[in-house]
Amino acid sequence: MKKRSSPTAKSVYMWNMLGNLAAAGVSVLYLLLVTRLTSDRVADQFSLAISIGNLWVIIGLFQVRNYQGTDITQRYSFTHYFFSRLWTIGIMLVTIIPYLYLIHYDLSAFSLSLLLLIILYRASDALSDVFQGLFQQNSRLDIAGKSMFFRYVFSVLIVWIGLLQTKSLILSLAVLAGFNLLFIVCYDYHYSHQFATIDWNYFGDRKYRQESFQVLKQCVSLFAYGFLLNQIFNEPRLVIAAGLRSGMLGKGLQRDYSILFMPVFFMSLCVLVIRPLITKLAVFWQERNMECFNQIVKKIVLVLSGISIFVVGVTFLIGPEIMTLVFGVDLYSYRLTLTLLVFSGFLYALATVFENILIIFRQHPRLFFVYIPMFACSKCITFAQVMEKKLLGAAVSFMMTMVIYVVGTYIIFYYFKKKGEKNGKSLV
């Protein structure tokens, strides 16, 4: 298929921003709809299912996107990336049941059906992501943005109308999962032909299959880190779920925490919006154009810092009032908890920037020295904090792990940036 003319930079940024706004907001809207249109018990179950889906989609994504998006020399073809994604989605689907047994998840018909449909829905996100990586490689994040924007807008409408008309969350999620798969085939796969063609003849070829596994081998450390990070994100929820089962914590606490945690994902949106700059950083680093490289890094840090100061201030002043009004749940007593979580979201966004740059450096295996202390900190302090201080304890424990995250990634980033400036192409 013939390539269309390149869009303007303004168009790319606009659609990238709209797409990522939709991606960040969709979970908030799902939770809002379920909270408003179902019972507290169903909202708690849905919140936990969403959090497990967020964890398990890491297997499907295998954290390949940042590697693929910065593969500007096209070391691997899109066919390699696509087939490697099919493998990871398959693993994602077959490993969820053993995990549910491991964490003693409620395996009643409703809870299990709810979770499995969420997993199918997140599998479609993982499939779409590999096409978005292709669009990013070709500086067409406008196409990726349009895909996310329209897919998520229609997804919210499906859940909303489904709950209003059928009163069945299960049926609504079943339609949601089917729609997302159909949209990806009709939109993402269709537009991918402008840049690459999937060679289906290689599907059974052993040599090509081994080369596809090489993609996963390059990203195995990123996958491990992504899984650990989401486990850290989920640790308070798992502790709350255990407290609810034992009767030590009150009903609705899972729902409240999920609502309060939403701004963390909005802060991470800042990183997604500046994704085009990450691609530029990869180009400048490849060329060793350190002046432009350093200018963009400073710009990103300053923009994130400015946004965070404003958002944290607004959160402390009127955050609980706004969220209480939107969700119809009394959140006035959580002012400090919400403020700490929003500040933690800024730390997470900043650390993610440094991590993305380390991927550009191809030094991501070094992140081992950051993620292990983070995970250990989360495991050691979260249970005691939650049981003693409830949601404030969850916020404190999460903030402490994010401090480790941002300090650790910055130290490694600074070391290898200086080494690259000194040694030229080599970082060894």
Image: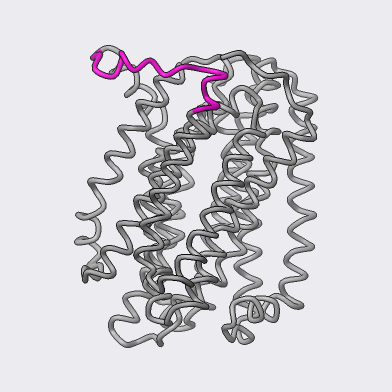
Q: Is residue 201 magenta?
A: yes
Which residue is found at the position 32% from the left and 61% from the top? 115
Residue 149 visible in this rendered orientation of the protein? yes
Q: Is residue 143 left or right of residue 155?
A: right
Residue 396 visible in this rendered orientation of the protein? no
Q: Nearer the viewer, residue 253 or 125?
A: 125
Q: Quadrant of residue 333?
A: bottom right
Q: Nearer the viewer, residue 367 or 83?
A: 83
User: Residue 151's spot in the image, x, y percent?
Assistant: 54, 47
Q: Nearer the viewer, residue 350 or 118?
A: 118
User: Residue 342's spot in the image, x, y percent?
Assistant: 64, 65
Q: Is residue 245 magenta?
A: no
Q: What segment is highlighted magenta in the picture?
A: 190-206
User: Residue 407's spot in the image, x, y percent?
Assistant: 60, 50
Which residue is found at the position 21% from the left and 55% from the top? 97
Q: Is residue 262 left or right of residue 238?
A: right
Q: Is residue 130 above or below residue 92?
A: above
Q: Is residue 410 left or right of residue 95?
A: right
Q: Quadrant of residue 244?
A: bottom left
